[in-house]
Amino acid sequence: MAPDAQAGQFGSLFCNTFAVEQKSVNGAEEPYEWSLELRRDLSASRTEIVAIKGVWARALRRWSMLVRRGVGVFLSASRTEIVAMKGVWARALRRWSMLVRRGVGVFLSASRTEIVAMKGVWARALRRCSLLVRREAGVFRRRMRRRRAEEMARLAASRRAEAAAEAEAEQRYQEHLYQVQERRADLAAAETDIAEGPRPFAWLSEGAKAVSAEMREASEELRALRRRAPGGRAPANYEQIDARIPRDADDFETVCAEWMRMAGFSGVQRTLKGPDGGVDVIASIAVGQAKFHPSQKISAEAIRALVGSRIERGKDRALFFHYGPGYTAAAIDAAVNTKVELYQLDVESQRFVRIA
């Protein structure tokens, strides 16, 4: 139902109700006219309300139209601005992307250039480093080889020294053993002499006992022969000259020097202790070598060493004396070829026997 019809019905109902109540109260007919006026007023009010509604409706329609127009303009402007902004942003994005691509290209180009340059630098550095490493490795290897050679030389020298010390110790042991055996033999002979009774020269060894009685006569005869010999030299038969039994290697050199003096060599003297260059006794015209080896034969190398010493010292003769088992066949051949006189001490006769 329309609002005007509702308002009319409401007004009619109100007026009728009010008129009835007035009739019942006052019992008169006057309120009826008043209700008619009221209805007229209400009708006029309804007319004004309708008119006002029409104004408001037209205003609302106008306002809505204006709003729609404004919204349309706003939307159109917004779309235009959005399109314009889209274009600006698109151009900016394209410009930015172009700049980015250019920058990336420049960066990549510069990076590739720097990478290539760095690769070249690193390659040169690596080649230089490898060259230096190879050089250092070569130097290190040469140093190690030199050190190994020096160590091997020191080891060989120490082994030679040990071998020489062992040989010397063995020689001293053999000499000491030989001396002990001689002393035991002398002790046994002394015990026999003591058991048999006192005899002249009982304190001498067996070899000395055999010539003790004739020693003075032989010495006098030898002195006479020296005086008669030209230049003070002894006769050629050196095997007639006596020699004593040495106590050790050093004493054997003294025995050889004494024998050379008795043989008529002048200026006889022993060399100093230490490296003697293959010479133990030296005279004016001869050199002598004394070897005290009770259990070892003389080799050809020792003979050749004596020949070299004779030539170096400018002497005419070379004499080799040995206290031991003798000379090897090669040593005798070398002595014959080089004209070296070989002598061996005979313990029984206490004289030097000429071998070659």
Image (spheres, rainbow, N blue to C red):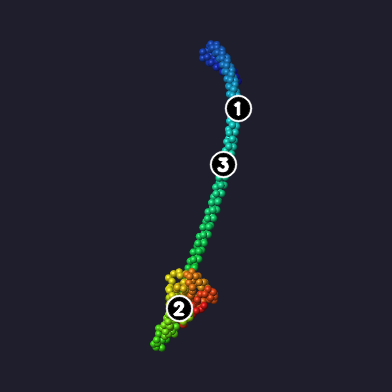
Kind of element beneath mark 3: helix
| 3 to the left or right of 236 | right
Question: Quick one: label 3, few (<14), some, or many (20+) residues within 10 Å?
Answer: few
Residue 114 got which mark? 3
Counting residues from the start of the chain, the first of labels 2 and 3 encountered is 3
Please determine whether, in this image, residue 312 is positioned above or below residue 244.
above
Task: Give how far across and how far down residue 152 sits, in percent.
Answer: 51, 63
Task: Give whichever of discs 3 and 1 has the lower sequence position.
Answer: 1
Comparing marks 2 and 1, which lies closer to the viewer? 2
Relative placement, left or right, of 237 versus 99 is left
Q: Amino acid at mark 1?
A: Val
Q: Which residue is mark 2?
A: 230
Q: Position of residue 318 (x, y in %)?
A: 49, 74
As measured in the structure, the alpha-carbon distance from the residue carrying label 2 to the one carrying label 3 is 106 Å
Task: Label 1, secondary structure: give it.
Answer: helix
Q: Amino acid at mark 2?
A: Pro
- Of the pair 213 and 141, the residue shown nearer to us: 213
Which residue in the protein does label 1 denote?
A: 83
Q: Secondary structure at mark 2?
A: helix
Given this view, does label 2 or label 3 mark the residue nearer the observer? 2
C-alpha span from label 2 to label 1: 151 Å
Residue 311: percent from left, percent from top: 49, 70
